[in-house]
Amino acid sequence: MDGESEQEILLEESIFIDAEDESKGRIVIFTINRPDKLNALNKLVTSAIKQASKKVMNEESIRVAIFAGASPNKPLEGKRSKPNSFVAGADISEFKGKKSEEIFEIFSDNCWEAVWKIEKPTIAMIDGFALGGGCELAMSCDIRIATERSVFGQPEINLGLIPGGGGTQRLTHLVGYGKALELILSGKFIDAEEAYSFGLINHICSPEDLRNKTIELATTIGSKSSHTLKIAKSAVRMALNHSIDEGIQKELRVFSDLFDTEDKEIGVNAFLEKKTPNWKGR
Ligand code: COA
């Protein structure tokens, strides 16, 4: 059955980066749990994702957040199995009868932006459909890892709509103007191979390898200084909002500021002494 309470609709699992030293922090996996509706984002899920994003920001022990979709439930007798899905979009049933003012208000404070604004590293772990708001959720994350059976697209045009969870902007930044327009104007679905070929996703793997590969990358990232990770993410983000000259000036400032941190001393000394750095996060 679909989970229909806020706890059940977004499952949470923690994995310690270093099982022997919990102070090294944890990776948290949030799994959207509406597999009978292909994990479509209804009001309850979007609200739970916004809460989860706040939690990732506020809890110091969380170093990396992973977003995933629940696997299909066992089908009822005589029924076909539902397909694998990361998220098959915003819940279309909630669009019926809605007018612009109401939608404007709902989308002014949305889950895609909440995930995008997380200052810590985020990864989308994708197995199956990543369509519309699902593709947008994946693009709100920093990194996308998908199985070879995954399918991507922005099919809103088929509903007389356009992407409204940041898709027109983030897709254009990620894959370029021409490919973004092709996907948004045609509404066509593409497979993981094609998505990988123009940079929509970072990695493709088999369904069996997806979890391990994602956790492995999250562990590598999560073992760095949490402060330096935050600065690195914000510095790369600056490339989206500034000219290259302005961005380079800003990089110089934040790069230089890192020389006043404890973690820079820790990192440099650890290298010179051939030791593993024990980061302080400041
Ligand atoms: N919103 C609400 N419900 C959705 C949904 C969405 N975005 N995507 C899938 N579902 C529901 C279906 O209505 C169906 O519910 P039901 O079993 O109660 O009838 C269930 O999920 C399974 O989907 P179904 O369409 O039967 O699976 P399929 O294998 O035949 O097709 C898709 C899969 C992804 C091609 C198809 O579901 C689809 O096109 N979904 C909408 C994608 C979309 O336009 N997303 C952007 C929204 S802005």
Image (cartoon, rainbow, N blue to C red):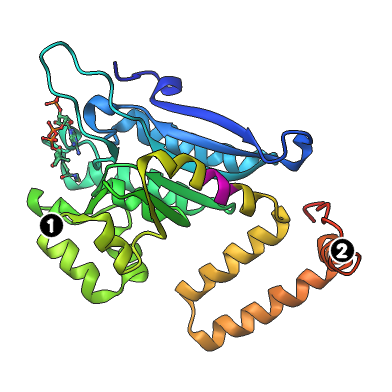
Q: Amino acid at mark 2?
A: Lys
Does residue 266 appear to the left or right of 16 in the view shown? right
- Given this view, does label 2 or label 1 mark the residue nearer the observer? 2
- Residue farthest toward the bottom in the current orientation of the protein: 245
What quarter of the picture does the N terminus occupy? top left
Check disc 1 and report its element: helix, strand or loop: loop
In the rendered image, the vertical position of residue 78 relative to residue 11, given as above or below = above
Tell me the quarter of the picture where residue 210 sits.
top left
Q: Amino acid at mark 1?
A: Lys
> At which x and y percent is residue 217?
56, 51
> At which x and y percent is residue 12?
51, 29
Residue linked to disc 2: 274
Check disc 2 and report its element: helix, strand or loop: loop
Question: Magenta segment, which residues?
Answer: 214-218
Q: Residue at x 27, y 38 (%)?
A: 85
In the rendered image, the vertical position of residue 36 relative to residue 231, given as above or below = above
Image quarter for ligand 1 equals top left
Q: Which mark is residue 188?
A: 1
Disc 2/disc 1 C-alpha distance (Å): 52 Å
Tell me the quarter of the picture where residue 58 sits.
top right
